[in-house]
Image: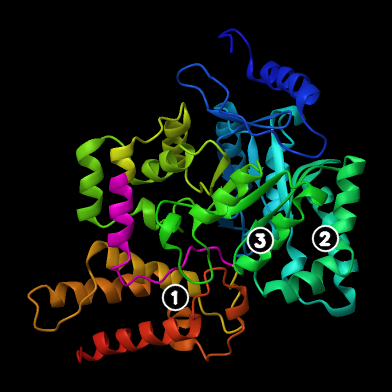
């Protein structure tokens, strides 16, 4: 790529060149586009040059309005989107259910301030995950059309069937295949209102295998999977090892979009003994950069999504991908060792996806798990009242708990209604874990640990 070419002209020329070579309705798998040092790394998907760093719009910053209600902080969203586009990020992933239903609107407002050919929008059919009875088809189509209105576009670049796999083959047939919903989206792609069609996967491997088995008929343009160096061979809950998922996509030449690259932030906040091992090799690199470099080293990865709520996270990720430096064999072996060691830490496997929210009884499920995991990572979980550090750890945990989770939203208020269970893509036994944490808190308060 010539140094004098602008990013906008680059995208236009890429569209023209790629369109001649791309198969109809399918993404071509190619190595990343060479870029000038200090600029974003791109991967090919059909005629598109997609930034290897994608913006996950699940966790936009919130603020309070004049009446004290929590709303998306549009000013900060605009600032983050502006900085991302200015530095080469062009893939923005949202969904109707993200940010309590406000993500598509906030994302659309921020993006519409830029030329339409400077970004790609990905959004999802989230109604698939809910049992709407006789209204399943009608409600799903309504959600689809509402996405166009919320985003303010007449074409969706990347459209996904959201989180297929949960509920197994029965749900897949009942809520997607048997009612003709997949056929509808295939027709929408043929009409050009959807440019690329794919699905995101959590759950039953049989569903994943089946959807790939019909690839010759459907021609999936891309597939979104959970992948990171911990889940590569050590996936937990109802997730499937990413090594298998990625391998099956590679066999068919289907590009992979990556979600949960940092496993809900846990790979960005490693325990000090593990972080120090990484620092001995690359002292100036963040823990997060290691996970992104691991993912970018696989040529079939089209885009790695990151939910960057803070500008410092965006800047750190831009540094990692501009351009990407692939990991070597020694670094890969070290990450596998770290992944194995992480299995020994008794953290709750929560990725803060918020799918379990809102709790009908007001419990802040992700907030509780986040505090507990943070204390485990930092080594401030008191395990023995006879330990010299017990009093300090006890105080840190209890004070931090009250500060991060309001008392009326703490684990003690879970009644075990189990309404959250079907929505967790990590298959966490949420009420059971909340009871365990609540018992631990009560022992700390009473001094009976």
Nearest the camera: 77 or 166?
166
Q: Quadrant of residue 271?
A: bottom left
Q: CA distance from mark 2 to mark 3?
A: 27 Å
234 versus 188 height, above or below: below
Q: Position of 371 compared to 109: left or right?
A: left
Q: Which residue is mark 3?
A: 209
Q: Comparing marks 1 and 2, which lies closer to the viewer? A: 2
> On the rendered image, what quadrant is the N terminus found in?
top right
Q: Is residue 60 visible?
A: no
Splitting the image into 4 quarters, where does residue 202 fall? bottom right
Q: Looking at the picture, how far across and down is residue 320, in whole percent?
A: 42, 34
Which residue matches tag 2? 143
Tell me which numbered mark, 3 or 1, is placed earlier along the sequence. 3
Answer with left or right where residue 139 lies relative to residue 222: right
Whether residue 35 appears in magenta in the rendering, the answer is no
Camera-nearest label, 2 or 3: 3
Stretch of the chain drawn in magenta? 333-354
Which disc number belongs to residue 296?
A: none
- Residue in the image at 72% along x and 57% along y: 213
Mark 1: secondary structure: loop
Above or below, 157 relative to 336: above
Q: Residue at x 8, y 83 (%)?
A: 386
Residue at 42% x, 71% y is 369
Judge the density around disc 2: few (<14), some (14-19), many (≥20) Cα neighbours within 10 Å: some
Q: Which residue is mark 1?
A: 406
Q: Could you tell me which quadrant the C terminus lies in?
A: bottom left
281 or 156: nearer the viewer: 281
């Amino acid at each position: 790529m010539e140094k004098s070419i602008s990013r906008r002209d680059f995208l236009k020329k890429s569209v023209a060149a790629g369109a001649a070579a791309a198969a109809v309705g399918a993404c071509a798998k190619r190595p990343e586009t060479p870029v000038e040092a200090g600029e974003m790394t791109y991967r090919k998907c059909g005629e598109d040059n997609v930034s290897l760093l994608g913006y996950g719009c699940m966790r936009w910053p919130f603020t309070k309005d004049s009446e004290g209600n929590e709303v998306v902080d549009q000013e900060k969203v605009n600032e983050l989107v502006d900085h991302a586009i200015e530095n080469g990020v062009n893939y923005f992933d949202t969904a109707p259910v993200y940010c309590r239903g406000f993500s598509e609107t906030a994302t659309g407002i921020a993006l519409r301030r830029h030329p339409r050919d400077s970004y790609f929008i990905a959004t999802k059919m989230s109604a698939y995950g809910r049992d709407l009875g006789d209204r399943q088809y009608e409600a799903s189509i309504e959600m689809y059309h509402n996405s166009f209105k919320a985003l303010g576009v007449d074409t969706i670049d990347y459209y996904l069937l959201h989180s297929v796999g949960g509920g197994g083959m029965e749900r897949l047939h009942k809520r997607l295949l048997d009612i003709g919903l997949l056929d509808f989206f295939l027709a929408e792609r043929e009409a050009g209102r959807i440019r690329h069609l794919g699905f995101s996967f959590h759950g039953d491997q049989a569903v994943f295998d089946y959807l790939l088995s019909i690839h010759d008929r459907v021609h999936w343009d891309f597939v979104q999977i959970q992948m990171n160096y911990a889940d590569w061979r050590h996936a937990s809950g109802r997730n499937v090892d990413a090594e298998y998922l990625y391998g099956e996509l590679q066999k068919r030449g289907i590009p992979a979009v990556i979600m949960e690259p940092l496993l809900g932030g846990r790979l960005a906040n490693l325990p000090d003994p593990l972080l120090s091992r990484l620092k001995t090799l690359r002292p100036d690199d963040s823990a997060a950069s290691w996970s992104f470099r691991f993912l970018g080293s696989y040529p079939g990865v089209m885009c790695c999504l990151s939910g960057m709520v803070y500008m410092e996270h965006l800047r750190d990720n831009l540094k990692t991908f501009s351009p990407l430096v692939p990991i070597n064999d020694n670094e890969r072996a070290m990450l596998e060792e770290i992944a194995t060691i992480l299995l020994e830490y008794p953290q709750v496997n929560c990725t803060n996806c918020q799918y379990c929210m809102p709790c009908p009884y007001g419990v802040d499920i992700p907030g509780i798990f986040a505090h507990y995991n943070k204390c485990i990572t930092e080594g401030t979980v008191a395990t023995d009242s006879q330990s010299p550090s017990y009093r300090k750890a006890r105080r840190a945990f209890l004070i931090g708990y009250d500060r991060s989770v309001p008392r009326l939203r703490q684990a003690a208020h879970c009644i075990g209604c189990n309404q959250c269970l079907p929505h967790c893509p990590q298959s966490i036994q949420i009420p059971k874990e909340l009871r365990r944490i609540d018992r631990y808190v009560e022992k700390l308060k009473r001094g009976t640990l």
